[in-house]
Image (cartoon, grey):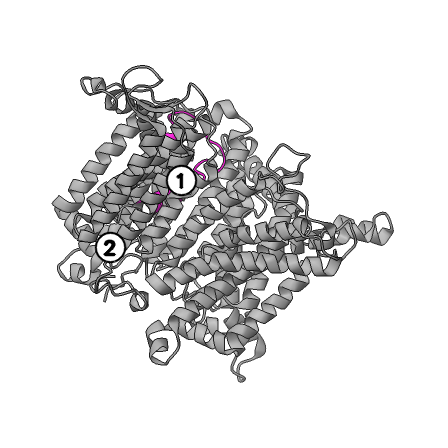
Amino acid sequence: MSEAAQETAPPPAKAPEPERESFGQAFLQGLWAANTVTVTILAVVLALVIGGILIIVSDPDVMAQYGYFTARPGDALQSSWEVVRDAYASLFKGAIVDPAAVSDWISGDGGWERVFAPISETLTYTTPLVFTGLSVALAFRGGLFNIGAQGQAIVGVILAALAGFLIPLPPVLHLIVALLAGALGGAIWGFIPGFLKARTGAHEVINTIMLNYVALYFLTWIIIQKGVQNPERTDAISKPVESSAQLPRLLGDNLRVHAGIILAVLVTWGVAWLLNRSTLGFELRAVGNNPDASRTAGISVTTTYIAVMVIAGALAGLGGANMVVGSTADALTPLVVAQIGFDGILVALLGRVKPWGVALAALLFGALRAGGNTMQSVSSISLELVTVLQALIVIFIAAPALVKAIFRLRAARAARLSTSLAKGW
Amino acid sequence: MTPVSTITANEMVAAPIQTGYWTRSRKVGVGLVAAGVLAAVVFGALATSQTARFTLSEDAQGAALAIDGTVGAILFGLIAAAAGAAMFTDRWFPWLLGVGIVCFVLSFLCWQISDAPAGQNFMPLVNIVRGTFLLAVPLIFGALAGVLCERSGVVNVAIEGQLLMGAFAGALVGTMAGNVWVGLVAAALGGAFISLLLAVFTIRYLVDQVVMGIVLNLLALGLTGFLYERLMQTNQAKYNQPPHFGNWEIPLLKDIPVLGPALFRSNLFLYLALILVLVIHIALFRTRWGLRTRSVGEHPTAADTLGVRVLGLRYRNVLLAGVVAGIGGASYTLLLYSFTKNMIGGKGFIALAALIFGRWSPTGALLAALFFGFADQLGVYLGAINSIIPSQFLAMLPYLATILAVAGLVGRVRAPAADGKPYIKG
């Protein structure tokens, strides 16, 4: 792990500066050195620029104006600017706050709910990503690449949903049982590659990829079984989870944000504690850094691998459970977990595989996703643009040397994303 | 785990050292005996006395290999068990394993066919063979792309993205140009575009190769999905009605019984895939380029010392892989369909599985792809005869087979030693 990985707190706003320089000088220097925050911000900017180009190129009306660019360049540039501005403005309005809603609220024309709706949406999308991101990040720290968060989330959502509509229980207990069932499902699905890695040396990347698809097919099978499928429907959808197993909503029934986000923060804290303060966390990091040295020091590498994958699986399973006990959906469908497992990989990388970093990265991705919905409905820019932006951000994060070169930043010290994973199959 | 492997020491920790009586062959033998007996008992009991016919045509007509359902299920199950028992001699492992698996499948088929609704107690072999090969085509291209990349030491998890980009570029440019061949070239370039990103970021910027592959898959998914919704959905006729290749019959070969109508009245992509397997096999093991590629994949430092340009070779191979996968992607859009969002749907990962299952060799990849294609086709067939076996479980088969393979239960798989490791000169 690099210096960056050893920080426990979220990345500081600037590098610590020597005292004799004036604050402003030092701040500017710290800012322009390729530190984690600068690289992240610039990566987001770069991704947005490329996204903007995509929006322009894929707009036939604007492209038509480029046909007579030499005659009237102003037209083309003007409409390019407008289409991109509109798109990103609605992205912002959908993710953070819509100024019109605020002024309506102040003048008494609109309710407070419209003001907080974007934030509520952002947090709703953030919640599962925190869990899957932590799952991937924890495995990374233990030297394992958990591409299987998707499959673990799927098995988690299956067990959580089954517990949610098959077992009749009183309200609070039912919710706890459903969440535990989700974690258990993910843990089982994480145990398999962990065990195979520890016992046979089978590479976890291959096994987790394969298990993702096994889980997906299992999900599509179990939905249409008797007793699981919704008897009132002919399509592939299960019975709904009982309301006694639903997480309570935080801001009233009209806003979707639910108690899952609180759970996510608690779990982030728990993972941070586990990694940095517990014996298991120490062993895990040691094995991740150097398995041979760890074995020499008396740490059981095989046990650690299995423990890492079980915990990572349980985290992803919790993320999956969130998809049916939260407000996103209340029944199993083939696409119930969406992409949260794969997005979790991006979140973990963007969060520099540190727990609080992961939480912040999940917040950014949740905001992009929430804003993407608004962008799609208001500016009719496909939601897929968000996937492109997310992938681009992580590509630039992963190659800080490129960002450095583009913006001519000064020498990078702590900016390199080192996952110490380059070891092939 | 061979001692030559420099993958990582930690992966060798717990690898059981196979000494003493219980060699791998004998262990697998036990499993095969159990499976064979199970097949004979279970499939034999479930099968009906209807005659199971394997017709040598596309329908129930013509010559057929016929056997009583119960008898067949029991017989083939016992042969599989016998093959397992023969493994205790510790010899002929691959052959016995092959016979055992084939007989297990035949036993299963005897049950299924004899149990089919009246009048459907036959399996048209021509259809099955043709379907197997057609479903395997994208897998073959994808796995070959993997071979090219990984033999030179770059892990290619981005096969899915390369296929998808190829399919998209083929459809888009093919439609706009109104020409299949232009579409094919565009598809190759589309795949190469993803490859270029993979190469630049992993070789130049030393980003972890698996990470980059995963991210590129998402990028390709988003990019093609975005442009699909923005361009293709709004103007289908202008952007997404690609011209299609027709079927080409090959003189003489098309008259071979069963194989002729199944394979040699097919399309360009199947021929190309089969030829590419041959070409890459020969190139990899018989030419200077192949020797250099393999040496760079196994021990780049040694290759560099001997004057091989490691990074240049890796760039070239990764780009070539993109071209191959891109053409494979075109087999979706320039043959039957127009482009739809996420149309590859995980086939790229099955191709990855085929690469690993085929132990990083072109011919192995072909066989693995055919096996997976057969599993796929079997699902279609069983669905048609209303089998009680859920198609979802058949669809899991390739993935489960790969897990068993990498866990060392079916055979030993070992990646090229430097696969996944960036090479830093100096």
Q: Quadrant of residue B105?
A: top left
Please report whichever mark, 1 or 2, sits nearer to the chain's N-terminal start.
2
Can you identify the residue that label 2 sits on? B26
Magenta stretch holds residue A420? no
| Residue under disc 1 on the same chain as residue under disc 2 | yes
* Chain hosting mark 1: B
Query: Where is residue A244 drawn, in percent x and y?
Result: 74, 54
Residue B73 shown left or right of residue B312 in the figure: right
Residue nearer the viewer, B423 or A99:
B423
Chain part drawn in magenta: B331-354
The disc placed on residue B42 is: 1
Parent chain of label 2: B
Numbered disc 1: secondary structure: helix
Q: Quadrant of the C terminus of chain B?
A: bottom left
Amino acid type of disc 2?
Arg
Camera-side residue of B387 and A220: B387
Q: Establish if B202 lies above or below B177.
A: below
User: Can residue B406 be seen?
Assistant: yes
x and y percent of residue A409 in the render?
Answer: 44, 65
| Mark 1 crowd level (few <14, some 14–19, many ≥20, 10 Å Cα) | some
Q: Amino acid at mark 1?
A: Val
Crowding at mark 2 (Cα within 10 Å: few <14, some 14-19, many 20+): many
Q: Which of the 4 quarters of the picture holds residue B18?
A: bottom left
Provide the secondary structure element on which disc 2 rests.
Answer: helix
- Among all residues in the image, which is located at the extreme top? B61
Q: Quadrant of residue B251?
A: top left
Residue at image coords 53%, 36%: A73
